[in-house]
Every structure is written in structure tokens, then in C-alpha cells.
Image (cartoon, helix red, strand yellow):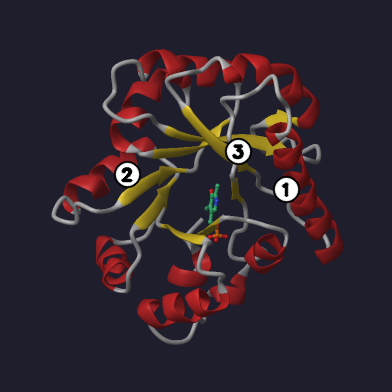
Amino acid sequence: MTAFSRLGGTIAGRIRQIRETLPPTVRLIAVTKQVSIAAMREAYEAGIRDFGESRIQEAETKQAQLHDLSDITWHLIGHLQTNKAQRALEQFQWIHSVDSLKLAQRLDRLAVGLSHKPQICLQVKFLPDPTKYGWTVEELITDLPQLDQCENLSIQGLMTIPPAGLSETELRALFEQARLLTQAIQQEQSCSRLALNELSMGMSGDYRTAVEAGATMVRLGRILFGDRAT
Ligand SMILES: *Cc1c(COP(=O)(O)O)cnc(C)c1O
């Protein structure tokens, strides 16, 4: 956990170093929960345009303070309660953490008449993990036809967070399973609306493995900004 607490260099330097190792097609999302506005501006200066936040309220405060940076794309990556769905749609272009059919259908109803479709990832658990939200693979397959009916959403891909403590081999297997599942869903004729070209996976501790397995979006916090308080 403390591996990143003595990060060398500047935020800009770390962003540059990580970018050099990422394929150009992989989107680097800077996860800025508990990160200061000054540090976020530094990341912006270094070219970051995708910011990830876990909480609606924290994001709202920061968005007001960063109002002058109008080309930021905001990504919600934390669990969303259905009663905050409207606010989430107003504040975020991407929601990675859609984790139930009920939430997807609520977002779909609320998105009627928006000028742009919300970009959505479906959060999936490939291993049992009581600390995380998300569909199991079996549950997702059951819900796919109804998700395909959510015509006001642009369902772009899958998101996953592996349970803590997996070996390198287990991580690789999990990420590959995510890629295979997106491919299987793409080939499913009955779900024609679901494009699922995106794989949102990979955090500070495992992003290299995730990218090797086919991640298209990595969500990096500590490796850019240092350890969080909690
Ligand atoms: C906090 C968080 C991250 C970033 O994790 P780091 O280990 O700081 O890179 C990524 N994804 C989600 C869903 C998170 O909550």
C-alpha cells in the first residue's frame, strides 16, 4: 500500500513516464478522489483531459473550481445510488460504475431528451467479492436483452475491479476473461445495440497487466498523485 508514498518527480513527470508505456489508443483516466485542485491543474497542464471521481458531491465541488477548463471529460467510477442518477447525468459524460439493471433503466429513463447520450460501462465481478458492486457474469448475461433496450444510453463496454490479493497469473486470467466476455457479447446478434468496444480496467497496482490483456481505459490514482489518506 505504501509503494507509491515516496513517488519521485513531479505529477507531470509521472504522467509522461506512464504515457510512454501505454499504447496510444489507451485512455488514461486520472483518478482524483481526495486530490487537491492544484494537483488536478498540474495534471491538466500535463495533458490529462479525463478525470475520474468516485463521489458526486466531491466532483461537483471540483467541477465548480475547475470551471475554466472546459474540455475536461468527467468519469464517474464509484457506486451510484439510484436517487443520485439525475445528478450523475448532469455532471459526468461517462459512468463506469453502472452495476445493476435497475440503475441502468433509471439512467435510461432520465436520459430521454439529453443532447448527448451518456457513455456507460457495465461493472462486472469475475470473482466473488462481497466488498464490490457489479453483475456476476451469469447475472449480466441474463440482463443483456433488457440492457440492449436502453436506447437512450450508449453502453460502451465493461468495467471491472479485481478483488485484492490476486497473483499476477490470476489477475491476467481475470482481465482476459473480461476481454473474452466483451467479444462474446459483441457477437451476440440479439444484442445489436451493445457495442462494448471499451474495457475499463487497470489501476495503479495492476494496469500493466490490464493493458496487456486489452484494457482500453486505465484508471490511475495513487501512481500519479501519491497515496490517499484512506
Ligand atoms: C480509487 C479508484 C481507482 C484508482 O485506484 P489507484 O489504486 O489509486 O490507482 C480506480 N478505479 C476505481 C473504481 C477507484 O475507486
Q: Which residue is mark 2?
A: 59
Q: Residue at x 57, y 55 (%)?
A: 216
Disc assigned to residue 137: none
SS at mark 2 in the image: helix
Residue 207 in the image, given as x and y percentages of width and height: 63, 64
Query: Contact, CB < 8 Å: mark 1 with mark 3?
Result: no
Q: Is mark 3 within 8 Å of ligand 1?
A: no
Query: Contact, CB < 8 Å: mark 3 with mark 2?
Result: no
- Name which residue type carries label 2: Ala
Q: Which residue is mark 1?
A: 179
Determine whether 20 is above or below 213 in the image.
Answer: below
Local crowd size for mark 3, using a 10 Å CA cut-off: few (<14), some (14–19), many (≥20): many
SS at mark 3 in the image: loop
Q: Quadrant of residue 217?
A: bottom right
SS at mark 1 in the image: helix
Determine whether 134 is above or below 40 in the image.
Answer: above
Local crowd size for mark 1, using a 10 Å CA cut-off: few (<14), some (14–19), many (≥20): many
Pick the residue in front: 229 or 132: 132
Disc assigned to residue 196: 3
Q: Of callouts 3 and 2, which one flags the residue occurring earlier in the amino acid sequence?
A: 2
User: Which callout, 3 or 2, points to the residue nearer the camera?
Assistant: 3
